[in-house]
Image: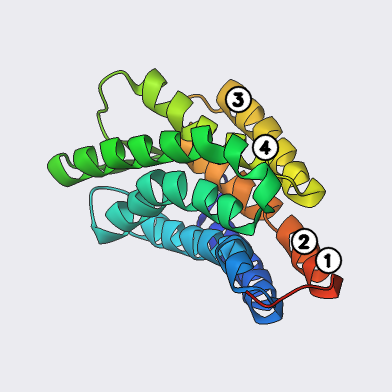
């Protein structure tokens, strides 16, 4: 994230707390992965605070950050949206799910075979995995994550998709070399929208699973 370890830590604690509240209010088991997204992203920001404090480099915190940011989110988001979506909207989520699986597999391979490093650049952190043809991987990643949110059958989830899509454009334009770090931070903050989604699902009648 931009600015400092303190900013990451504060954002992580706040977003994580909202994530705990989301998980605690879930009534349907199939909603749990999506409701837990703020908790995952809040934890992710706390890990990046550790990266700041360690001065970057290739330590365990950097690796943990990359595992969450890259393969885990690429697969988690489309599968979580698929699980929470009504049956009539699930077919159109096949493309983001397949894209997420392929992207996660590719990123997992490169994280396992190459060293990921973090470079503190003023008020941002740049991460490097040395991916071949990174543009294709990033396209698959955004199709899986942003695409799944935008194709959801739920209006609040689509709103989250719009927010993170706008964030992706802004981060790519302003922070080209630090895109992943700044976009993940933006996505973490935007994920507080999920609390409203969980509240709406709690009020709606329906089975718990």
From where the camera sits, is residue 177 visible? Answer: no
Q: Quadrant of residue 35?
A: bottom right
Instruction: Give the x, y percent position of residue 206.
Output: 77, 73
Of the numbered discs 3 and 2, the one sitting upstream in the chain is 3
Residue position marked by numbered label 1 in the rendering? 200
Taking depth in this image into account, of 125 and 80 the one nearest to the observer is 80
Q: CA distance from mark 3 to mark 2?
A: 30 Å
- Can you name the residue that lies furthest to the bottom here? 24
Of the numbered discs 3 and 4, the one sitting upstream in the chain is 4
Q: CA distance from mark 2 to mark 4?
A: 16 Å
Instruction: Give the x, y percent position of residue 73.
Output: 46, 49
Residue position marked by numbered label 3 in the rendering? 174
Q: Which mark is residue 197?
A: 2
Residue position marked by numbered label 4 in the rendering? 151
> Do the residues bearing badges 3 and 4 touch, measured as CB atoms within 8 Å?
no
Q: Secondary structure at mark 4?
A: loop
Q: Residue at x 63, y 70 (%)?
A: 19
Instruction: Give the x, y percent position of residue 10.
Output: 61, 65
**Quadrant of the image containing the C terminus:** bottom right
> Do the residues bearing badges 2 and 1 touch, measured as CB atoms within 8 Å?
yes
Along the horizontal axis of the image, is 42 left or right of 86? Answer: left
Q: Closer to the camera: disc 3 or disc 4? A: 4
Residues packed near mark 2 inside 10 Å, few (<14), some (14 to 19) or many (20 plus)? some
Q: Secondary structure at mark 2?
A: helix
Taking depth in this image into account, of 120 and 197 the one nearest to the observer is 197
Q: Secondary structure at mark 1?
A: helix
Q: Residue at x 59, y 39 (%)?
A: 91
Of the numbered discs 4 and 1, the one sitting upstream in the chain is 4
> Do the residues bearing badges 4 and 1 touch, measured as CB atoms within 8 Å?
no
């Amino acid at each position: 994230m931009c600015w400092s370890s303190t900013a990451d830590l504060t954002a992580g604690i706040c977003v994580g707390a909202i994530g705990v509240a989301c998980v605690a209010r879930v009534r349907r088991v199939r909603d749990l992965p999506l409701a837990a997204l703020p908790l995952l992203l809040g934890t992710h920001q706390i890990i990046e605070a550790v990266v700041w404090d360690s001065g970057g480099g290739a330590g365990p915190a950097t690796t943990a950050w990359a595992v969450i940011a890259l393969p885990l989110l690429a697969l988690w988001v489309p599968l979580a949206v698929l699980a929470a979506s009504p049956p009539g909207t699930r077919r159109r989520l096949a493309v983001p799910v397949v894209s997420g699986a392929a992207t996660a597999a590719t990123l997992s391979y490169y994280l396992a075979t190459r060293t990921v490093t973090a470079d503190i650049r003023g008020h941002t952190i740049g991460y490097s995995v040395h991916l071949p043809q990174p543009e294709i991987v990033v396209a698959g990643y955004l199709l899986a994550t942003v695409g799944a949110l935008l194709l959801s059958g739920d209006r609040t989830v689509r709103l989250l998709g719009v927010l993170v899509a706008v964030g992706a454009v802004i981060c790519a334009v302003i922070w080209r070399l630090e895109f992943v770090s700044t976009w993940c931070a933006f996505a973490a903050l935007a994920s507080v929208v999920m609390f409203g989604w969980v509240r709406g699902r709690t009020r709606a009648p329906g089975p718990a699973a």
